[in-house]
Image: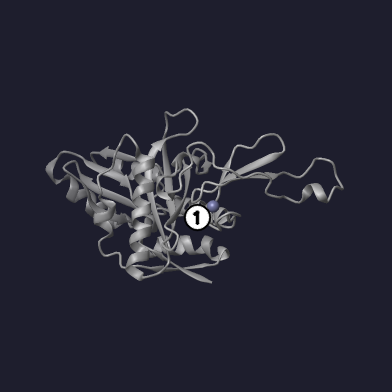
């Protein structure tokens, strides 16, 4: 069992360990006293996916450095557009596994429509109660603030706390924002998405490059009866034959590396690897009844 460092909350550590444990990792939290400052790095709205992956990579590398461990893991959530029509708001989680010895990173991401961080301006208790109900309160925690101070009270899971925060926010007569709390420990949808993206990561880590031994090959679109995997560490491309359709052929069901080479544009530097190749698990929420 290897130990991997996380620069994140205890809830994130719990979610990640559940999925990484079968892959042979136990999670140790690094000092995260400056986590809010890291989370507050200004977002590049034009490239939220790339920015989130770079932020997750930074956290993974810092976690390994602070603990002196070889492995680090970082996670960052971001808002984007749905992957189908590119019009609906969509929540994503980006996760990065970092191997200090190889200077090798493995990226993964997953998306969901469930926890898209709804926010509503309300003017009284009835409006706040309706907004809270739509958000799934109290299972889903809320953030209440005034227009000039939208995040002043976080982690609200109690109706009495909600009412007090609302009265404070409404004191200037300019309305109050009622928002979903996006932190993993207060957001069941985000916690579930972190588990999913970590499980995807664990499955990718199980595949090691036959050329250099680095973990976490990317699946590429296959051709006919084959599947291709790309190593972002050395650029090797492996082609795996899929089982033949004809039953009873044991030889045909044994996968083997059939071809290797450096594809056009492949980088030796994992950090510069094209991020779009990482897989995405898409989850669609059903309307609340
Ligand atoms: Zn390799």
- Name the residue: 45% across, 41% down: 274
Q: Position of residue 273 (x, y in %)?
A: 44, 44
- Name the residue: 38% across, 68% down: 29
- Residue 178 appears in the rendering: yes
In front of the other: 127 or 110: 110
Q: Is residue 23 above or below residue 80?
A: below
Q: Where is residue 215, by image quadrant? A: bottom right
Residue at the extreme front of the image, as rendered: 261
- Name the residue: 23% across, 39% down: 123
Q: Circle 1 is placed at which residue position?
A: 198
Q: Dot 1: few (<14), some (14–19), or many (≥20) neighbours within 10 Å?
A: many
In front of the other: 147 or 106: 106
In front of the other: 187 or 259: 259
Q: Position of residue 244 (x, y in %)?
A: 79, 42
Q: Is residue 204 left or right of residue 249?
A: left
Residue at the extreme right of the image, as rendered: 248
Mark 1 and ligand 1: say if the CB distance to the nearest ligand atom is below 8 Å: no
How many dots with numbers?
A: 1
Specify how the rendered protein is coloured: one colour
- Name the residue: 78% across, 49% down: 253
**Which secondary structure, mark 1?**
helix
Q: Is residue 158 above or below residue 176?
A: below
Q: Position of residue 100 (x, y in %)?
A: 41, 62
Q: Position of residue 276 (x, y in %)?
A: 46, 39
Q: Quadrant of the N terminus?
A: bottom right
- Residue 157 appears in the rendering: no
């Amino acid at each position: 069992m290897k130990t991997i460092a996380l620069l994140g909350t205890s809830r994130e550590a719990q979610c990640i360990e559940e999925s990484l444990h079968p892959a042979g990792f136990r999670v140790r939290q690094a000092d995260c006293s400056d986590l809010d400052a890291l989370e507050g790095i200004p977002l590049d709205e034009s490239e939220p996916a790339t920015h989130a992956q770079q932020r997750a990579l930074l956290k993974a590398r810092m976690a390994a450095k602070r603990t002196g461990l070889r492995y680090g893991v970082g996670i960052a959530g971001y808002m984007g557009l749905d992957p189908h029509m590119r019009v609906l708001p969509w929540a994503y989680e980006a996760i990065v596994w970092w191997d200090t010895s190889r200077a090798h990173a493995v990226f993964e991401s997953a998306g969901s429509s469930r926890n898209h961080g709804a926010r509503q301006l309300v003017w009284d208790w009835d409006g706040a109660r309706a907004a809270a109900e739509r958000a799934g309160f109290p299972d889903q925690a809320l953030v209440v603030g005034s227009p000039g101070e939208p995040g002043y009270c976080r982690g609200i899971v109690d109706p009495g706390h909600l009412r007090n925060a609302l009265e404070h926010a409404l004191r200037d007569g300019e309305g109050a924002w009622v928002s979903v709390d996006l932190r993993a420990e207060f957001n069941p949808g985000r916690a579930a998405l972190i588990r999913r993206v970590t499980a995807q990561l664990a499955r990718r880590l199980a595949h090691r490059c036959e050329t250099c031994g680095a973990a976490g090959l990317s699946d590429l679109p296959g051709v006919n009866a084959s599947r291709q995997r790309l190593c972002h560490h050395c650029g090797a491309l492996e082609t795996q034959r899929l089982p033949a359709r004809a039953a009873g052929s044991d030889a045909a069901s044994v996968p083997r590396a059939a071809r290797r080479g450096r594809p056009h544009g492949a980088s030796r530097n994992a950090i510069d690897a094209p991020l779009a190749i990482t897989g995405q698990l898409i989850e669609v929420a059903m309307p609340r009844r």
